[in-house]
Image (spheres, rainbow, N blue to C red):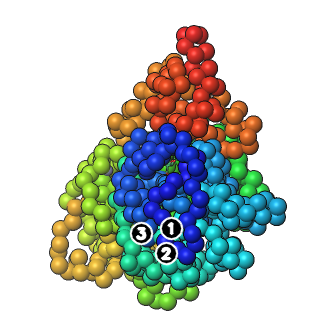
């Protein structure tokens, strides 16, 4: 029993009956719940502060990166406070897994949604009425129904947690009108704490959430944005498919990951192709039949080694903890989107990778999207400058993570876990090269694309150049000393620095921007990133630790055996494997090889209920492994 008489409910209802006898070893505070129920050692970052504040009846706004551990911030206060914790979540499809994970921990949780049989809904409603349930997950549409509100009026409510709270904001990337109506909670239930949680960073969205949910009197808990276990690599696009395949082959043979493509066609083709290469890939995009989509998502969550090839329609609310990589075949529209998409990797804290290929063509395409939209001009300008920031990230000569975190207003040191940190590109004084590249743009009339301009600079006298008489120009052949890939790199950097613009109407023709003209006039100097030939490979300590783990053969074999045991248990219960144990828990078992129920409880992620349920099965696997060795 986790029901505890922490701060008494201050609403109109009399307090719930407490159980006459509480078992003496029942967890009685937040840390005990964390250790006994969840099997974790310590709170992360702001978790403890949020939990204390909300358990004592306070409302709060919580901003934490994906995988930061937002769920515990409402789950533990729900257990500490009398009454049911009401959790509002936008995606019905994923509620069931969350509920399942809680039930596995011995927590009384349920979801109510339209996809459920009426009898099950009634049962949960009765449990809410009788105070027999710790947490209930609902979509906002359900919460706002008159009948449901009346039910809540007569029940004890521990708290309202509004997950993915950015959905209340029109500024946000995922506005949901029903979310905005949640503003009524503050009026109807003034004594119940409200907790808004999101991973979306920007200031206008935060303001909207705080206004809409009347959180101005509550506290804000803002965590750093860093995801230290994610390694970032951005490579120049050469052959995107082959590059992504090489990345997957080299880094992650048997793990789950996501490959993002821009178009539905792109998704279908890439998924087919990866399957042809012997990998298990599934497509996901908005054009697929809803059933196919749901099935593919289900397989991604429940099976091992699946690569989901998807448009950005896939991902929101996916809390599969062991997504090991996120690869981008095309650049997204800005750094926020990039960070959100890559953030789906490594929620379990284990080393994970974000890999993106990038070319100027993609930049032009994103510009086209912005221009073609019917947003007001001011909005378009913002979108363009956000895209510029992303291009700056792609062309950066220093730490990628630092650039990302600075973009979100979070200062940081060079991280040692991104491609530019591990393999710093050389820089050179690119002033003269930039001037030559810009002159070529200007002298040819500001309408030609990169390959043409490079040919002019390198003095290639092809028919088209002769036809336009560009072989007569002073710039013709002034760049012979520099290679073609080097010139391409210089143009990309000039675009990223906004000294040269890509004309969206004219098939990617380049022109000088105002900043570019000023640069020429003011004779400023410019450091550019050198062109890289073959990369030397450097490994981070995180990667090395992961590899060492797999190299210790005994442990890797035991890990595989533990995974197989987990899959069997998961299939028998029809739940995703990570609901039983995370990879991290299995890895610790493989390393420490606990040989008794007590030793088992020291393993990260091993709560008491889970040890009770599964301890024997896993101890058997370990014992068999030891005696075979
Ligand atoms: P978010 O909702 O912020 O994206 P989650 O709440 O899903 O993140 O947490 C991410 C993962 O981290 C989950 O698997 C969760 O069990 C785990 N986790 C959260 N808090 C802790 C902690 N204090 N110690 C160990 N693991 C934790
Ligand atoms: Zn770095």
Residue 433 seen in the current view: yes
Name the one closer to the observer, 437 or 71: 71
Q: CA distance from mark 3 to mark 2?
A: 9 Å
For the point 44% across and 44% down, the residue is 32
Q: Please name the residue that numbered disc 2 is placed on.
A: 191
Badge 3: few (under 14), some or many (20 or more) residues near its Cα, within 10 Å? many
The quadrant holding residue 136 is bottom right
The mark that comes first in sequence, 3 or 2, is 3
- What's the mark number on residue 58? 3
For the point 46% across and 21% down, the residue is 552
Badge 2: few (under 14), some or many (20 or more) residues near its Cα, within 10 Å? some
Instruction: Please determine whether, in this image, residue 90 is positioned above or below residue 216.
Output: above
For the point 73% across and 40% down, the residue is 573
Instruction: Please determine whether, in this image, residue 121 is positioned above or below residue 508.
Output: above
Residue 391's x, y, as percent?
39, 65
- What's the mark number on residue 9? 1
Say which of marks 1 and 2 sits in front: 1
> CB under 8 Å between callouts 1 and 2?
yes
């Amino acid at each position: 029993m986790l029901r505890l008489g922490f701060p008494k409910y201050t609403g109109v209802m009399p307090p719930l009956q407490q159980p006459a006898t509480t078992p003496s070893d029942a967890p009685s505070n937040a840390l005990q719940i964390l250790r006994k129920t969840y099997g974790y050692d310590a709170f992360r970052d702001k978790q403890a502060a949020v939990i204390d504040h909300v358990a004592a009846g306070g409302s709060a706004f919580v901003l934490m990166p994906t995988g930061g551990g937002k769920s515990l911030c409402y789950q533990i206060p729900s257990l500490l406070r009398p009454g049911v914790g009401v959790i509002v979540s936008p995606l019905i499809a994923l509620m069931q897994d969350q509920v399942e994970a809680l039930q596995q921990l011995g927590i009384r949780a349920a979801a109510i949604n339209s996809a459920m049989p009426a009898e099950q809904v009634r049962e949960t409603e009765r449990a809410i009425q009788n105070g027999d349930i710790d947490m209930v997950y609902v979509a906002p549409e359900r919460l706002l129904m008159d009948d449901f509100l009346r039910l809540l009026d007569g029940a004890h409510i521990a708290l309202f947690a509004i997950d993915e709270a950015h959905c209340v904001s029109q500024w946000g990337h995922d506005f949901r009108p029903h979310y905005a109506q949640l503003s009524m909670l503050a009026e109807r239930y003034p004594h119940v704490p409200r907790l808004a949680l999101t991973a979306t960073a920007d200031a206008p969205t935060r303001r909207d959430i705080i206004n809409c949910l009347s959180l101005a009197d509550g506290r804000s808990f803002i965590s750093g944005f860093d995801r230290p276990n994610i390694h970032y690599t951005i490579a120049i696009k050469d052959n995107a498919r082959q590059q992504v395949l090489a990345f997957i082959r080299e880094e992650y043979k048997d793990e789950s990951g996501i490959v993002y493509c821009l178009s539905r066609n792109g998704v279908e083709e890439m998924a087919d192709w990866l399957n042809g290469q012997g990998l298990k890939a599934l497509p996901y995009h908005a054009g697929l039949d809803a059933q196919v989509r749901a099935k593919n998502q289900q397989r991604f969550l429940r099976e091992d080694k699946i690569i989901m090839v998807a448009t950005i329609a896939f991902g929101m609310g996916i809390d599969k903890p062991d997504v090991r990589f996120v690869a981008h075949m095309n650049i997204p529209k800005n750094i926020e989107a990039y960070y959100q998409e890559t953030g789906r990797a490594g929620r379990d804290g284990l080393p994970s990778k974000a890999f993106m290929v990038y070319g100027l063509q993609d930049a032009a395409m994103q510009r086209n999207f912005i221009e073609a939209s019917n947003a007001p001009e001011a909005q378009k300008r913002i979108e363009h400058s956000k895209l510029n920031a992303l291009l700056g990230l792609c062309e950066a000569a220093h730490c990628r993570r630092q650039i990302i975190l600075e973009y979100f207003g979070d200062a940081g040191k060079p991280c040692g876990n991104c491609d530019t940190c591990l393999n710093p590109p050389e820089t050179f004084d690119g002033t003269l090269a930039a001037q030559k590249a810009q002159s070529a743009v200007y002298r040819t009339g500001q309408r030609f694309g990169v390959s043409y301009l490079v040919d002019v600079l390198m003095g290639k006298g092809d028919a088209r150049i002769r036809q336009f008489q560009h072989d007569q120009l002073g710039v013709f052949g002034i760049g012979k000393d520099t290679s073609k890939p080097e010139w391409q790199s210089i143009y990309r950097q000039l675009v990223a620095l906004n000294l040269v613009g890509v004309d969206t109407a004219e098939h990617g023709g380049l022109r000088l921007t105002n900043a570019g003209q000023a640069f020429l006039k003011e004779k400023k100097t410019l450091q550019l990133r050198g062109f890289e030939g073959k990369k030397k490979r450097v490994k981070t300590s995180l990667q090395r630790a992961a590899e060492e783990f797999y190299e210790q053969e005994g442990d890797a074999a035991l890990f595989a055996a533990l995974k197989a045991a987990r899959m069997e248990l998961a299939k028998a219960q029809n739940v995703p494997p990570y609901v039983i144990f995370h990879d991290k828990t299995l890895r610790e078992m493989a390393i420490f090889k606990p040989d008794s129920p007590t030793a088992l409880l020291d393993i990260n992620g091993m709560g008491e209920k889970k040890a009770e349920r599964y301890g024997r099965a896993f101890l058997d696997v370990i014992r068999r492994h030891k005696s075979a060795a």
